[in-house]
Amino acid sequence: MDPKSVESLLGGCSGVHFSGFHLDDTEKKSSTISDSNRFQKQPFVIGVSGGAASGKTTVCDMIIEQLHDQRVVLVNQTSFYRTLNDEELVHAHGYNFDHPDAFDTEKLIACMEDLRNWKSVDIPNYDFKSHKNVSRPRKVNPSDVIILEGILVFHEPRIRESLNMKIFVDSDADVCLARRIQRDTIEMGRDIKTILDQKYADIIIPRGGDNHVAIDLIVQHIRTKLGQHDLCKIYPNFFVIHSTFQIRGMHTLIRDTDTSTHDFIFYADRLIRLVVEHGLGHLPFKEKQVITPTGSVYTGVEFCKRLCGVSVIRSGESMENALRACCKGIKIGKILIHREGDNGQQLIYHNLPTDISERHVLLLDPILGTGNSAVHAISLLMSKGVPETNIIFLNLISAPQGVHVVCKTFPRVTIVTSEIESRLNEEFRVVPGMGEFGDRYFGTDAC
């Protein structure tokens, strides 16, 4: 496949970039992967190359942020520098660290092969001052997506052949770097002029991390290759939280007709909390530095403070406690929509914060069925001045029909759910569903 400039295919860069904030939980995973993962396809392996300061790390970070519902691990080629011997240490200032011989390529290949076969690996901790591996290696567990980043990751054919996608981050500095490497290698009698040759890349990203359009295209392609649900492939604004046996177990309990009201509330609250926390991860954020009790500086993030919730009465009110637990003192508005006849909808009542147009809104309704109620609610919010991009719709289960309706009508509204249902029945109820959620949650199903 010939290299293709993403910019030439799609044009200029997109506008303001909003991405989900995700703390990779790879280190928390057990080194033993469950049998449910072993019959899956191998992980999707991405190679990211480019010159020094070209923006490789920024591109990797942006891909990881947008793949917030996948397990992603980053492997740096610089972790595999060879330990210098005594003679090399004496002349370390003149050592060519940009040459392939500077790396323990065999160890890198072995680690990548183990990760591709769902095996945990130990990544060396290389110290750039002593030029040795120090302390204990970093344990890395296999993940759905593996990103290998480094200046020479495309040089070794065996590495190139193992990559599902090869990304070259281009910048003006690359020309100078390539010339320097060619100069050094010619002086050393080695001919590796194609170390940074872009011909090995599947995709070339001009302007590095500034090219949001390119990153979005890459993430969409990765999602497709991972075989996510068709709805997630079709609608980039639709997200399903990563399913685990624990989540499936809680869904089993709240869907069971024999589950008591007390247990239904307990497990529904746990699921709602997960959906709310995932939804909060889609809010825009900025970097913030704080001073820790040890007097050290910690660089973290700060989410937007102009936030409110809006619950669709009455089922949506079941989600308010979880939202308050995550966002202390948050304002919450109400919308009442009445169902009429052949699935018609009528807006009956609303009470919203007066400054709602200046806030990001978390719209709460546990069931997305036909999508009509959601369309009414979102339309009301937008009529009050809320930008479409500032609305995040949170629910527990979504019927495909409702997802199509909402996503097509409001393609810039973010939707987060915990499971996708099979269909709607002739009475417009979701199947398999969990019954009238409000009645079961508030204990009025026997009335």
Image (cartoon, rainbow, N blue to C red):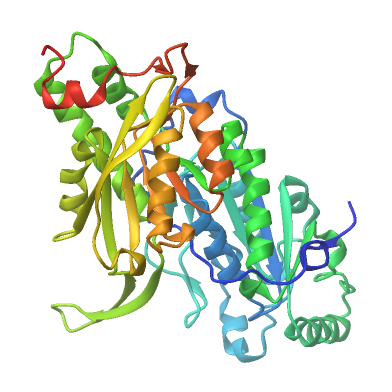
Horizontal placement of 201 versus 370: left or right? right
Name the residue nearer the viewer: 234 or 341: 341
Question: Could you say where residue 293 lies in the image, as x and y percent from the top left?
Answer: 13, 78
Name the residue nearer the viewer: 284 or 171: 284
Q: Is residue 327 visible?
A: yes
Q: Please give the name of the residue rendered at 48% of the width and 51% of the height, measured from the top-left corner.
A: 413
Furthest residue to the top? 258
Horizontal placement of 30 versus 8: left or right? left
Image quarter in which the C terminus is found: top left
Question: Could you say where residue 380 lies in the image, as x and y percent from the top left?
Answer: 39, 51
Question: Could you say where residue 116 lies in the image, as x and y percent from the top left?
Answer: 60, 40
Tell me how many marks there are. 0
Name the residue nearer the viewer: 390 or 186: 390
Q: Please give the name of the residue rendered at 63% of the width and 67% of the height, measured from the top-left corner.
A: 212
Q: Is residue 118 visible?
A: no
Seen in the picture, residue 264 relative to 86 is either above or below; the reply is above
Seen in the picture, residue 124 relative to 112 is either above or below; the reply is below
Q: Please give the name of the residue rendered at 46% of the width and 26% of the height, measured from the top-left corner.
A: 399
Horizontal placement of 349 versus 370: left or right? left
Question: Could you say where residue 321 lies in the image, as x and y percent from the top left?
Answer: 15, 44
Seen in the picture, residue 153 relative to 141 is either above or below; the reply is below
